[in-house]
Image (cartoon, rainbow, N blue to C red):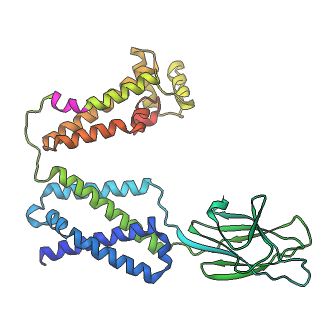
């Protein structure tokens, strides 16, 4: 098959994945509107696919398909799959809710009132500022109350994982109300003989995302993330193979300077290190030789050896720093052998040093640091 046809097909498949992932994660409201959904998918797929044709041709031309690219692709897929497994992955359906007082009552009721005491979305109380109050609603102690008028509504729309529940007053002056969920109407008579009673309505049987939809979006995310990482890796290593270059230690160590400066500032600010309840318990174990399985014995013994040199949490922090700096040094030396642009390496170094969690973790006396 013609290689240009393959690369063009890949660009449009990739564009379809971009469209699906973008819609389900950022504008899920149109998933319930089939015509708009299909139109948007087609439009974005064609537009993005046309724009990416040349990019895919460049990266998938048979002349450039060598072992390093295949390796990059495998690494990208494995890395992306791991990320998607670690990050909580939910495809929540988009739902609409309307609370519509009917202005009607039964023969025993003394009024047509509707008091909306509470609306919960997945056990989260919906605040007033997220409700769209239409018509003559009164606010009494922060509760929307209907007493008269036509075309009075409460509108809400958004993502729902499992359920919607409402609490409505159920007293002698209560009238009738209509709840509309995704266009499906249900009428309720709120009349009750007790002045302080409440009627609770639970909407648990909401249509959720199907297994097909969840798998489709997961696959779209996987392809999108994999190809993004693949393109980045290929960009920095394209047509470059490791060479037996004479790279001095200083050539790669210089990229550690921003990281060392950042770590030193945090270390001096929180000297001798950050310790939590777990840290103190492990410190007690290595100080008293009373070992337990709350912490990995290997990690505790390793820290015990370090504190034989200097009995201080700071010694453990410094050891953690040296260990990670060695790994980073090896990484920068390897990238230099691939002749990766030094501006990219400086950018990586500065970005790594500016992310607060990196500096905070390295000065924390936790088993998680060395294992991570």
Quadrant in which the C terminus appears:
top left
Vertical placement of residue 86 versus 254, above or below: below
Specify the quadrant of the image occupied by residue 39: bottom left
State the extent of the magenta-drawn residues as a range. Answer: 250-255
Task: Tell me which residue sits at (29%, 37%) in the image.
Answer: 350
| Viewer-proximal residue among 296 and 333 | 333
Task: Please determine whether, in this image, residue 335 is positioned above or below residue 133.
Answer: above
Residue 301 drawn at (x, y percent)? 43, 25
> Residue, x 14% and y 64% (percent of image)?
58
Q: Picture quarter containing residue 187?
A: bottom right
Is 29 located above or below residue 324 in the figure?
below
Query: In this view of the protein, which residue sits in the foreground, 109 or 305?
Result: 109
> Is residue 164 visible to the viewer in this orientation of the structure?
yes
Query: Is residue 126 in view?
Result: no
Give the x, y percent position of residue 54: 16, 68
Q: Is residue 257 left or right of residue 114?
A: left
Q: Main secondary structure of the magenta part?
A: helix
Residue occupying the point 32% across, 40% down: 351
| Image x and y of residue 313, in percent | 46, 21
Does 55 sit left or right of 210 as displayed?
Answer: left
Classify residue 325 by image quadrant. top left
- 252 falls in the magenta region: yes
Q: Would you place residue 52 above or below residue 75 in this image?
A: below
The answer to whether residue 26 is left or right of residue 102 is left
**Side of 128 relative to 290 (left or right):** right
- Expressed as whole percent of the image width and height from the top left, the position of residue 199 reads 80, 69
């Amino acid at each position: 098959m013609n290689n240009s046809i393959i690369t063009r097909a890949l660009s449009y498949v990739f564009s379809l994945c971009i469209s699906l992932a973008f819609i389900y994660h950022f504008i899920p409201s149109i998933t319930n509107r089939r015509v708009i959904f299909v139109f948007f998918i087609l439009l974005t797929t064609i537009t993005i696919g046309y724009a990416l044709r040349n990019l895919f041709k460049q990266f998938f031309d048979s002349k450039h398909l060598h072992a390093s690219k295949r390796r990059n692709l495998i690494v990208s897929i494995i890395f992306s799959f791991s990320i998607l497994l670690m990050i909580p992955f939910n495809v929540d359906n988009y739902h609409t809710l309307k609370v519509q007082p009917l202005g009607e009552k039964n023969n025993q009721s003394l009024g047509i009132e509707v008091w909306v005491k509470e609306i919960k979305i997945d056990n989260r109380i919906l605040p007033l500022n997220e409700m769209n109050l239409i018509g003559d609603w009164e606010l009494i102690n922060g509760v929307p109350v209907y007493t008269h008028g036509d075309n009075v509504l409460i509108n809400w729309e958004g993502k729902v994982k499992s359920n919607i529940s409402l609490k409505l007053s159920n007293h002698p002056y209560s009238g009738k109300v209509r709840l509309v969920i995704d266009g499906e109407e249900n009428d309720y008579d709120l009349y009750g003989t007790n002045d302080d009673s409440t009627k609770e309505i639970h909407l648990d049987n909401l249509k959720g995302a199907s297994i097909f939809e969840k798998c489709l979006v997961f696959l779209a995310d996987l392809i999108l993330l994999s190809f993004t990482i693949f393109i980045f890796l290929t960009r920095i290593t394209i047509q470059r193979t490791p060479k037996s270059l004479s790279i001095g230690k200083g050539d790669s160590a210089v990229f550690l300077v921003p990281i060392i400066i950042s770590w030193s500032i945090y270390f001096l600010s929180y000297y001798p290190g950050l310790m939590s309840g777990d840290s103190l318990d492990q410190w007690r174990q290595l100080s008293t030789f009373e070992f337990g399985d709350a912490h990995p014995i290997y990690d505790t013994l390793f820290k015990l050896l370090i504190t034989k040199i200097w009995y201080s949490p700071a010694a453990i922090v410094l050891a953690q720093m040296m260990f990670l700096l060695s790994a980073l040094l090896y990484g920068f030396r390897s990238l230099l052998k691939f002749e990766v642009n030094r501006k990219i390496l400086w950018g990586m170094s500065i970005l790594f040093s500016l992310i607060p969690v990196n500096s905070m973790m390295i000065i924390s006396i936790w088993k998680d640091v060395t294992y991570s």
